[in-house]
Image (cartoon, grey):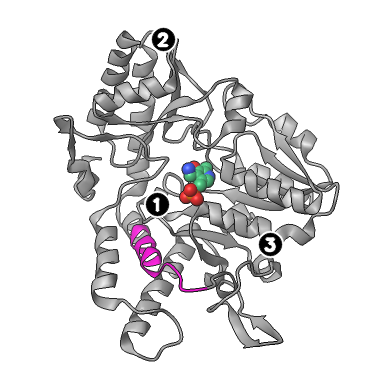
């Protein structure tokens, strides 16, 4: 596991006289040299606007960006390059879909979500519901952090137009049975949207096998840059979706009386795209293809399980969520302490974790808690990071 640490320069940073322990990877991951260099090289050597130019720099920039699209296509098992739309991230991808699906919802239709969603997989659907008169319903989450499948099957009806859920929960680390949920929703006639923000790094995602209509993810949670992500959509779904922003790049012809649009993915990529971001994301995909990801994920799972069993020994430690399959997240509370205070005490010991509602306020409401302390791991975290977390939590409990 330590082999890949050397690829991430920021992990050498010292904070409070010790190497920084970064355990906020569900919020964003650190970047390897390969990604940093790809972005710098683009600006240093190839910078030009993409598409529609005959000179060498523009051709190079276009090739680099389109190669990144091809890399993303292979990374998630999409059948066609045209199914990969570059967006600013998961949030923009879901907004793009929710915006485009306005016409499929009529008053009384239902949009089925879950209580386990990030706000970015709730609010765009609420906005669609407001526009269309559709009604939001949400699958209940159980106290152990698993979705209540009985409730899912009860709420999935012939009124369900859209079903949107996350693949992996950012707040609790629950790995949802995405294939089962998507298949049932599809059989019920719903359009399926999967938020893969927390899944793409830790799992092998195969959208063709999953057979969802849409899948969204962000580059910055998988060692790529911020400001770039992907909306995958089945080609026929993307063809049917209206464009959502107008401007350059997305048109075929423009007259003052009207315009015609390009085919996907360009129909959805108005304006100058985040070229450097796309290239950086492509570099992140190549990096993930080059490392022994399966072994690293197995080691990460082992480390998370071991850390959890050590944390459980600490008096006052209360785990939030006991899902059957956990991704690299440990969400917890310390009896009698506010999560924010715990986070501050951990920071004082050089351990970076996140505290609060993790953009999942409905989940916190369902669990009846104000928030949690969340330690989220990545493939570069090692036993020393885990030890430092356990010692820091132990020490924090003596202060609180
Ligand atoms: N969904 C989940 C499950 C997430 O964890 C996040 C980021 N915390 C998002 C959506 C939103 O991603 P972004 O901010 O990159 O758009």
Mark 2, other Cα within 10 Å: few <14 / some 14–19 / many ≥20: some
Which residue appears at 23% of the width and 72% of the height?
A: 44
Q: Earlier in the sequence, mark 1 or mark 2?
A: 1
Which residue appears at 60% of the width and 34% of the height?
A: 116
Mark 3 vs 2: CB contact within 8 A: no
Residue 130 lies, in percent from the top left, at 75, 49
Q: Earlier in the sequence, mark 3 or mark 1?
A: 3
Q: Which residue is mark 2?
A: 316
Residue in the foreground of this view, choosing between 313 and 107: 107
The disc label shown at residue 220, or none = 1
Numbered disc 1: secondary structure: helix
Residue 198: tell me if it is visible. no
Q: Quadrant of residue 393?
A: top left
The magenta stretch spans residue 126? no
Numbered disc 2: secondary structure: loop
Residue 189 lies, in percent from the top left, at 79, 52
The disc label shown at residue 100, or none = 3
Main SS class of the magenta portion in the image: helix
169 to 141, vertically: above or below: below
Residue in the foreground of this view, choosing between 382 and 50: 50
Mark 3, other Cα within 10 Å: few <14 / some 14–19 / many ≥20: some
Q: Quadrant of residue 114?
A: top right
Residues drawn in magenta:
271-284
């Amino acid at each position: 596991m330590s082999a890949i640490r050397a690829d991430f320069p920021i992990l050498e940073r010292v904070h409070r006289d010790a190497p920084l322990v970064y355990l906020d990877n569900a919020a964003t991951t650190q970047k390897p040299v390969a990604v940093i260099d790809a972005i710098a090289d683009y600006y240093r050597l190839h910078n030009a606007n993409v598409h529609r130019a005959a000179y060498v720099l523009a051709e190079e920039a276009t090739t680099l960006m389109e190669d990144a699209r091809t890399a993303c296509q292979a990374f998630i098992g999409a059948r066609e390059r045209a199914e990969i739309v570059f967006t600013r991230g998961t949030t923009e991808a879901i907004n793009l879909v929710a915006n485009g699906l306005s016409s499929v919802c009529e008053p009384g239709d239902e949009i089925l979500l879950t209580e386990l969603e990030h706000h970015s997989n709730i609010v765009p659907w609420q906005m669609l519901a407001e526009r269309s008169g559709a009604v939001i319903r949400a699958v209940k989450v159980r106290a152990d952090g698993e979705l209540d499948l009985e409730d899912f099957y009860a709420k999935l009806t012939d009124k369900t137009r859209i079903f949107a859920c996350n693949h992996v929960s950012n707040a609790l680390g629950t790995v949802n049975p995405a294939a089962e949920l998507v298949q049932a929703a599809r059989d019920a006639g719903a359009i399926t949207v999967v938020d893969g923000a927390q899944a793409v790094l830790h799992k092998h995602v195969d959208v063709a096998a999953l057979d969802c209509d849409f899948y969204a993810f962000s580059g910055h949670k998988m060692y790529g840059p911020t400001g770039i992500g992907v909306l995958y959509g089945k080609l026929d779904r993307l063809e049917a979706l209206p464009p959502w922003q107008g401007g350059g790049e997305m048109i075929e012809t423009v007259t003052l009386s009207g315009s015609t649009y390009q085919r996907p993915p360009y129909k959805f990529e108005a304006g100058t795209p985040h070229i450097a971001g796309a290239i950086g994301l492509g570099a992140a995909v190549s990096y993930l293809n080059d490392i022994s990801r399966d072994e690293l994920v197995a080691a990460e799972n082992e480390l998370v399980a071991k850390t959890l069993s050590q944390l459980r020994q600490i008096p006052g430690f209360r785990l939030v969520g006991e899902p059957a399959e956990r991704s690299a997240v440990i969400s917890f509370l310390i009896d009698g302490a506010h999560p924010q205070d715990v986070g501050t005490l951990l920071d004082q010991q050089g351990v970076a974790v996140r505290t609060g509602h993790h953009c999942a306020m409905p989940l916190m409401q369902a669990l009846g808690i104000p928030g949690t302390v969340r330690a989220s791991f990545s493939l570069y975290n090692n036993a020393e990071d885990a030890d430092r977390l356990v010692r820091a939590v132990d020490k924090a409990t003596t202060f609180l």
